[in-house]
Image (tube, rainbow, N blue to C red):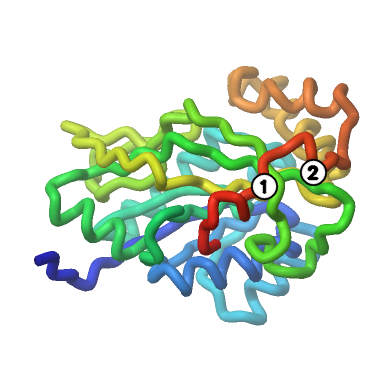
Amino acid sequence: MIYFKKMKIVLVQVIYNEIKMLPWKMKWAAENGIEIFTFDNYSSDGSTEWLEKNGCDFEMLDTGGMFSLRKNNEAITKKLYQLNPDWCLVAGCDMFYKLLDYDIKLNKFIEIAEQQGYNAIDCSRLFNFYYTGTENDNKDPRKQYFYYEEKSDWKISLIAKYDKSLWIDGDQFFVRDRTLFEYPNFVCLHYWHRSDARERFISKWQRRYKSWQAGIDIKSHGGHYPDIIMKDKWIYEPGELKDIRELKAKI
């Protein structure tokens, strides 16, 4: 029998202009027993005001108008040191973790990993969702974004038992003496390609480019953005993609 204990599980995220996704990410966290701390990268779309109005824990993070993964990760690492959680996770505002085959909350899944002696959780399946022309970004994306492509070799650890030796490199945690919990139906739902995808990708690429020019980040971090922009495809046909409803998943 598994006995659950109350654990402090914290997600630290960095956002920039995420007003359309922010309320749903906070709702998802509350549903899954996850505390969220947000760094706001000086948003201009009302995200800052939303965080203030809703009493969220957040700070402003000044990166000089650039998207710098290095600066973001440094801020996340320092904040985790201050918060000292039992477990921690990192994910963009448009990323939601989910078990496909069991209706179990994320905090309980993490507690199972803890009880079985693991200190990191692998997420090897990334579901990238795409806009097909009918989705409404003012509604919960889990209820109306259904069409996706799967990246099944993602193999990334963004959930870990906290230890002060933990560090972040690129997009994942590294833990000393890592014991990795691998579960094939634990996935990341990534609502990255929404109705405003063109505007968002161009803006993010411009901000990333500034960090490359400044020599802060390496070009392999975000190097796929120019290819996506050059492709210039922002609305997809459902027949080109998989339908998550066919998995009979309870999203």
- Residue 1's place in the image compared with 239, above or below, is below
Question: Taking 59 as reference, is 163 left or right?
Answer: left
Q: Amino acid at mark 2?
A: Pro
- Quick one: SS at disc 1? strand
- Reading the chain from its start, which is encountered first: label 1 or label 2? 2
| Nearest to the observer: residue 175 or residue 118 | 118
Q: Residue at x 18, y 71 (%)?
A: 5
Quadrant housing residue 148: top right
Q: Tell me the kind of residue under disc 1.
A: Asp
Q: Which quadrant of the view contains residue 20?
A: bottom right
Name the residue rendered at 55%, 74% in the picture: 56
Q: Residues within 10 Å of mark 1 (few under 14, many from 20)?
A: some
The image position of residue 13, as x and y in percent, is: 53, 53
Q: State the residue in front, 140 or 85.
A: 140
Figure quadrant of the C terminus: bottom right
Residue 51 position in % (x across, y down)? 64, 72
Q: Residues within 10 Å of mark 2 (few under 14, many from 20)?
A: some
Helix, strand or loop at disc 2?
Answer: helix
Q: Does 146 sit above or below residue 54?
A: above
Residue 7 position in % (x across, y down): 24, 67
Residue 59 horizontal/vertical position (percent): 56, 62
Residue at 9% x, 66% y is 1
Q: Which mark is residue 120?
A: none
Q: Is residue 18 left or right of residue 59?
A: right
State whether residue 84 appears in this view: no
Residue sticking out furthest to the left: 1
Q: Quadrant of residue 179?
A: top left
* Residue for point 51% across, 46% down: 188
In the rendered image, which residue does mark 1 sit on? 243
State the residue position of label 2. Answer: 238
- Please give the count of numbered marks on the rendered protein: 2
